[in-house]
Image (spheres, coloured by chain):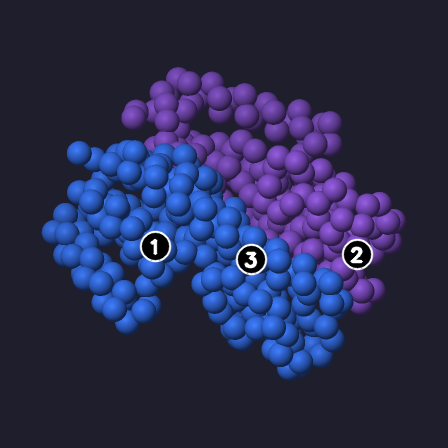
Chain colours: A purple, B blue
Amino acid sequence: MPVDVKLWRKRREEAYRRIWEDLEIGYLDEDLLGILLEFFKRPESYTTSSCSGRIVLVDSRMPWERRNATIIFKKHSSISLEEIRGLLNQPVLYRLWLIATGPIIHVVALTAREALRILRIAREAGFKHSGVLSVSRKGYLVELRTGIRLAILLKTGSRVVVDEQGLQEAVKAVNEALSEGKKRLQRLLEVLRKHAIK
Amino acid sequence: MPVDVKLWRKRREEAYRRIWEDLEIGYLDEDLLGILLEFFKRPESYTTSSCSGRIVLVDSRMPWERRNATIIFKKHSSISLEEIRGLLNQPVLYRLWLIATGPIIHVVALTAREALRILRIAREAGFKHSGVLSVSRKGYLVELRTGIRLAILLKTGSRVVVDEQGLQEAVKAVNEALSEGKKRLQRLLEVLRKHAIK
C-alpha cells in the first residue's frame, strides 16, 4: 500500500496548525511542545494525538474499558490526597480505579525507513512498548508508548477497599508513575535531538 | 533492510520444533497451542515467545520494573485468596503488586504485507495494542497485545494496605482480567481461521 504523498503533506500541515491552536486554548500539554516540534523538524514525520501522561479516577468494571466507564477526575500533573478524598464518598456503579498512564505519542511517517528510525529512537528513550500500528495511504502510524501504567482499585460499589495508609500509598505511587513518565519524555527529547536530521 | 529468507526459514523450523519440546516439558500453555499452529499454517509467519496471560505477585518499586523485582508467585490460571494469603505475611523490600496481564504473542512475518495482515487480524480479535516492533534481516516482528493489565498494590514494606474485602476484590479482579484475556485468545483463534490462507 503506497503512501499518498500529497495527502500526507496536507495532513501534516493541518496537524502543525492544530498544535498552535491547542496550545492557545490550553488543550496542549506544554511538556510536550518541544518534543512535537522536534518531530516536525524531521521532513518525513509529524505527530497527531499525544499525551504527556495523566492520572485519572474512573468508575468502570475494568480499567481498560471505555464503554460504561465514567471519568470522575483527570489531571496531567501530580495529585494530592485532598483532591480525591472527597470523591471517594460518592457510591460508584462498578469499581473506582485510580489510574496513572505514561506518555503516548502518535507519529505519522512518510516512509517505512523513517518509521523504523522513529521506532529506534523511541526504544533508545525507554518507550519500550512502541510499534507501527498501521500502514495506509495516510502514512505509517507509529505509536510511542512506555510500560508505565498503574491501576489501583480504591472502591467497589459503595465500599472503599483501601485503608487510610493504602490511600496515601496509592496517591504516592501514581504520582511517582507520572513523574517517571515525564522523565521518559525528557529522555525522548534528548534522543530526538541527538538523532536530528541535518 | 531486506529479510534474509534462508535465515527466516531456519528460525521458523527451530521455532516449530521448540513448540513441541515446550509442550512436552509442560512449559507451553496449552491454551495457546491451537493458535500457534494456526500461525504456522500461514506460509509467511511463525511465532516465537508467547504467553496466554498470567497472574503474578511481585515485590518491586513499580510494577513495570524488571530490575530489583522479585516474582513471589506466578500462575497462568485463576487464583484463590488462600493461595496468596500466606504470602502476604512476609515483609517486602519495596511494594507488593498483584498483577494480571493479558495474552502476548510474538509473530515473525517474512514480508511487510504479511505483517500488516497479522496486524489487521489482531485488531479484529481485540488485540488493540498490537504493532510491528522491529524489522531486520530476521523478519518483521509483530507483537499481539491487548489492553488487559491490572496492577493492584497490596503492601508497602511491612504494611498491608488493603483490608480483607479489598483483598477479595483484588483476587476477583485479577481473575476476571485473566479470563477476559482467554476470551480474547478464543476470538483470535476464530479470526485466524476465518482469514486462513488456503
Quadrant of the drawing holding the N terminus of chain B: top left
Q: Amino acid at mark 3?
A: Asn
Residues tagged by mark 3 and mark 1 found on one chain of the structure: yes
Q: Residue at x 79, y 56 (%)?
A: A160
Q: Are marks 3 and 2 on the same chain?
A: no
| Disc 3 element | helix
Can residue B30 be spotted in the picture? yes
Q: Is residue B156 above or below residue B47?
A: below
Q: What kind of residue is marked 1?
A: Leu
Question: Label 1 lies in what chain?
Answer: B
For disc 3, the chain is B
* Disc 2 target residue: A160
Q: Is residue A42 visible?
A: no
Q: Position of residue A102 (x, y in %)?
A: 60, 50
Which residue in the structure is indicated by mark 1?
B32
Residue type of the residue flagged with mark 2? Val
